[in-house]
Image: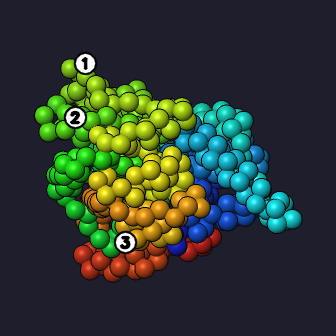
Amino acid sequence: MVIQSFGGIEGVTGSCHLVKVDHMNILIDCGMFQGLDEDKNYEPFGFNPKDIDYVILTHAHIDHCGRIPLLVKQGFKGKIVSTRATYAVARIMLLDAAKVMLEEYKVNYKKALRKGKPEEAKPPLYDEDDVFYAMEFFKIFLEYDENYKLSKNVEIKFKNAGHILGSAYVELTAKENGVRKKVIFSGDLGTDDKLVIKPIEYPKTAEVLFIESTYGNRNHRPLKDTILEFKNAIKESFKDGGNIVIPTFALERAQEILFILRKMYDNGELPPCKIFLDSPLAISATKLFLQFPNQLNGEVLDYIKKGKNPFVFPWVYFTESVEASKKINDIESGAIILAGSGMCNGGRIKHHLKHNLWRENSSIIFVGYQAKGTLGRQIIDGAKVVKIYGEEIAVKARIYTINGFSAHADQSILLKFIKSVKNLQSVFLIHGEPEVMKVFKEKVEEETNLKPHVVKFKEYIYIN
């Protein structure tokens, strides 16, 4: 068995790992590069898509599935394997990605045209028709703990990763030269305490582990403390009137916030208000959660069993149309607005910030990571003035930054995952920033007898 990584190494986007075993080429994820690395999406894959027999998709975040339509465009004719929930989520995520790329291209093309250099505007990687065609290659849907043979000598199994709806880590077992080896590919791992979906399930045995290390250098704040801080921020924010704007990631974070607000409403803790989920993608994702009750945790299931929607109650409004979104900004007080993008770099959130950021009696509550260079990061770093659509907007609203909602495993969970694996011989670190992986590598060495290897781009790793 030979493994090469073409993304999700020396960074946290573009996950893509090629496994060559038993005369097959198996791709674990095919993600899009994001942020400062997005130009890499236009570079060759590093392998011939026509040669890939299977794509094993761990989950539907764009940095793990975002280049699948491009892979198909360039000749992939194999089969995609996923959970049914991952298939459903991937469909809406990829369609949204195609829409966003087209919108960005139109804006960039106009700018390039005015410069007299239209060739500078890079076309979208794919369009909606490409997404619909790519979805036809999802052929195999597995439940957790279900064994599936890719060939006589190779089988795979999905285990619950506890990251997002449908997420899994992959156990790949191969028999070569009479020797049987199990390799685990973690995808992205979640946590022990989850608000909406079931928590992570730990592995039992394997010889080799490829493990993500996104937060390998730190531990998250306890979830119960995070929820309490969020509730207090909501209550404090409504004392002086005004609105509350919450930049929200469409998948999982939006549903977690809605569920907390639902419980506040039921317990009489929520001041009278109107709650707007102002994101077509988040609305679609929220509806999907109810289609997969077997993925949800006990508390959420209790609501469903009682005939209650865990995410929708009398004060909640879904605003899908642009017109409905614009009307929200006529409201001067008593509104909670959940909108994307989560880092405020695009989408409807920018309009809501433009209308509320300068108002002293409004609040902005950040509940997700804000990357360097984003509008959200500027605000939490204390900027007094920011530019939104070319207009200078004063930052006078109260700013709350609430950490602890992360869907990613922290250092303690990653270590627990490694220690749970009996017979483990080799650990390979992927999906992390170099400085974080260095810290995590040292921590693993300190607490185990293992010597983790930090995977390099296109490096050949032989599993004998």
Find numbered disc 3 in the image and state the secondary structure of the residue it sits on.
loop
Q: Identify the residue shown where x is 63% and y is 63%.
A: 38
Marks 1 and 2, how far apart in space?
A: 23 Å
Compared to residue 403, the image places residue 287 above or below, namely above
Dot 2 or dot 3: first in sequence order is 2
Q: Which residue is mark 2?
A: 272
Q: Identify the residue shown where x is 60% and y is 72%.
A: 457
Which mark identifies residue 376?
A: none
Q: Are marks 2 and 3 in contact (CB under 8 Å)?
A: no
Compared to residue 309, the image places residue 70 above or below, namely below
Q: Residue 448 placed where, x, y %?
A: 27, 74
Q: Residue 160 placed where, x, y %?
A: 36, 44
Res 2 quadrant in image: bottom right
Q: Identify the residue shown where x is 19% and y is 48%.
A: 239
Find numbered disc 2 in the image and state the secondary structure of the residue it sits on.
loop
- Frontmost residue, 38 versus 53: 38
Which mark identifies residue 307?
A: 1
In the picture provided, is 346 more to the left or to the right than 144? right
Residue type (three-letter) at the residue carrying disc 2: Pro
Residue type (three-letter) at the residue carrying disc 1: Gly
Q: Residue 14 placed where, x, y %?
A: 57, 60
Q: Badge 3 local density, few (<14 within 10 Å), some, or many (20+)?
A: few
Q: Which residue is mark 3?
A: 382
Q: Identify the residue shown where x is 77% and y is 49%.
A: 74
Marks 2 and 3, how far apart in space?
A: 30 Å
